[in-house]
Amino acid sequence: MKELLLLIGAYCLCCCYATAQEAPDTVRAVRAESVDSAAVRFSCQLQGRGQILLEWTADSVTEGDYFIIEHSTDDQQFQTLGAIRGINGQNRYQISDNAPFGGSNYYRLKRMGLRGQVLYSKILRQSSSAAASFRFYPNPVDKMLIIQSDHAIDIQVLSSMGALRLSRAIQPGLQVINLSALEKGTYLLRISDKENKTDRMEQLIKN
């Protein structure tokens, strides 16, 4: 009887050891699969006026999901370009970088879920021929719009019917404008460059 108990004990110890050896490989496999599924067909392409369009398809999107596009010029330090809230049942999304930097631009998609999981896509690179003297982000915007300019400019936010909703004089550098008072919808952003004596219009989407 004692010999039988010893044999059973030795067998259990061997099983526990084998399971402990296999566990790390199993965890690595699950994590790799999760990272690969963060974004499907994540792509970017250069459009007219130097804009870069980023598109992606994600599986099993729920209302608690968020998609954050991050941008970098060196493939190392990333900053948030824009964020989109996931819509239950909608799996196709897009966002534009309206004023990419000259040279190489790097983008990655960060997916965040209700349970706290954070997943990253592959990193994409897109080249732009000319450096922008003015850029704004994120677009779509929730509350705070970040504007970066090489020199002083005037900006106006217009409704789709052309009504003036906001006007600001922007100094050189980085400025933050609070747009929380604007209703959800599509607006026009007019940029008046007094130094170059030019006006341009950009589409601005308010979440």
Image: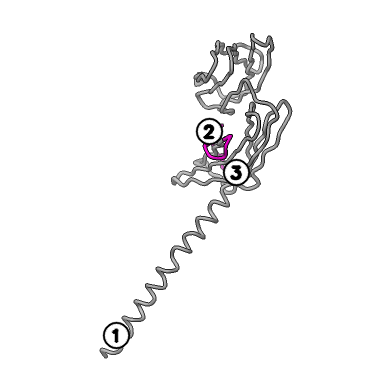
Q: Amino acid at mark 3?
A: Ile
**Residue 43 relative to residue 8: left or right:** right
State the residue lying farthest toward the left. 2
Residue 16: image quadrant is bottom left
Asked whether 96 or 106 is in front, the reply is 106
- Give how far apart the Cα atoms at labels 2 and 3 are: 14 Å
Mark 2: which secondary structure? strand
Q: Which quarter of the rendered picture does the N terminus lie within?
A: bottom left
Sort mark 2 into few (<14), some (14-19) or many (20+) by Cα contacts within 10 Å: some
In primary-sequence order, the first of circles 3 and 1 is 1
Give the extent of the magenta segment: 72-88
Q: Amino acid at mark 2?
A: Thr
In the rendering, at what x and y percent does residue 95 appear? Answer: 62, 33
Q: Which mark is residue 123?
A: 3
Sort mark 1 into few (<14), some (14-19) or many (20+) by Cα contacts within 10 Å: few
In the rendering, at what x and y percent does residue 24 appear? Answer: 44, 63
Q: Which residue is mark 2?
A: 80
Q: Which residue is mark 1?
A: 6
| Residue at image point 66% right, 15% down | 161
Sort mark 3 into few (<14), some (14-19) or many (20+) by Cα contacts within 10 Å: some
Asked whether 83 or 134 is in front, the reply is 134
Asked whether 78 or 93 is in front, the reply is 78
| Residue at image point 55% right, 10% down | 169
Whether residues under marks 3 and 1 lie with C-beta atoms below 8 angstroms apart, the answer is: no
State the residue lying farthest toward the right. 48
